Image: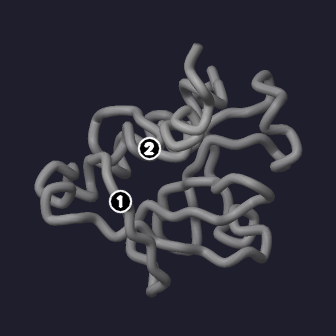
Amino acid sequence: MKGQERWDVHPLKPGDHIRVKYQNFYHHGLYEGDGMVIHFAGPDMRQLLEPEVVQVRRDSLDTFSMDRHIEVRCYSLRERLQRRPVEKILSAARKSLGEKGYDILYNNCEHFVNRCVFGKAFSSQIDEMRKMIPED
């Protein structure tokens, strides 16, 4: 699941892992279908640093994207073989609605999506950020 990720623009399907660029990071969500997205966010993107208001929520695609370009994750063959079926992905996301405990380094929106998709929480953008921090 690690390695070079590929993202593309194409029509959305239920269970798609989607993202939008917001300032210096990407915000991730799961496309549920019917114009709805399940994601780990606050009522406003400016509130991501206020974990008490951040929760797994269902919002419209417009609210999620904030008029930004939406990219869809393109999985490698290995990832497609490890990926849960769409019904299980969406079931996991729906069961998480209202969940709190946001932590930008250990439990962020990308961790949430990967937990739903693969059953394992990880964040490639946090891993990449850690590589840039010199070790003592």
Q: Is residue 13 left or right of residue 130?
A: left
* Amino acid type at image mark 2: Ala
Give the Cα separation between the discs numbered 1 and 2.
Answer: 25 Å
Q: On the image, which quarter does residue 77 sit in?
A: bottom left
Q: Quadrant of residue 126?
A: top right
**Residue topped by disc 2:** 93
What kind of element bears circle 2? Answer: helix
Q: Are marks 1 and 2 in contact (CB under 8 Å)?
A: no
In this picture, is 78 found above or below 53?
Answer: below
Which colour scheme appears in the figure? one colour
Residue 106 relative to residue 104: left or right: left
- Which mark is first along the chain, 2 or 1? 1
Residue shown at 55%/52% (left/top)?
38
Q: Nearer the viewer, mark 1 or mark 2?
A: 1
Type of amino acid at the residue the image marks with label 1? Gln
Residue nearest the observer in this picture, 135 or 34: 135
Return the residue at label 1.
Answer: 4
Residue shown at 32% from the left, 52% from the top: 3
Q: Residue at x 77, y 41 (%)?
A: 42
Q: Residues within 10 Å of mark 2 (few under 14, many from 20)?
A: many
Left or right: 119 as drawn, with respect to 125: left
Residue 10, picture quadrant: bottom left
Up-down relation of residue 90 to residue 109 (above or below):
below
Above or below 11: residue 92: above
Percent position of residue 46, x then y: 88, 45
Q: Quadrant of the C terminus?
A: top right
Q: In the image shown, does 75 or 88 lie closer to the viewer?
A: 75
Residue 40 at x, y percent in the picture? 62, 41
In the image, taking residue 54 as reference, residue 78 lies left or right, namely: left
Disc 1 residue crowd, few under 14, some 14–19, many 20+, Cα 10 Å = few
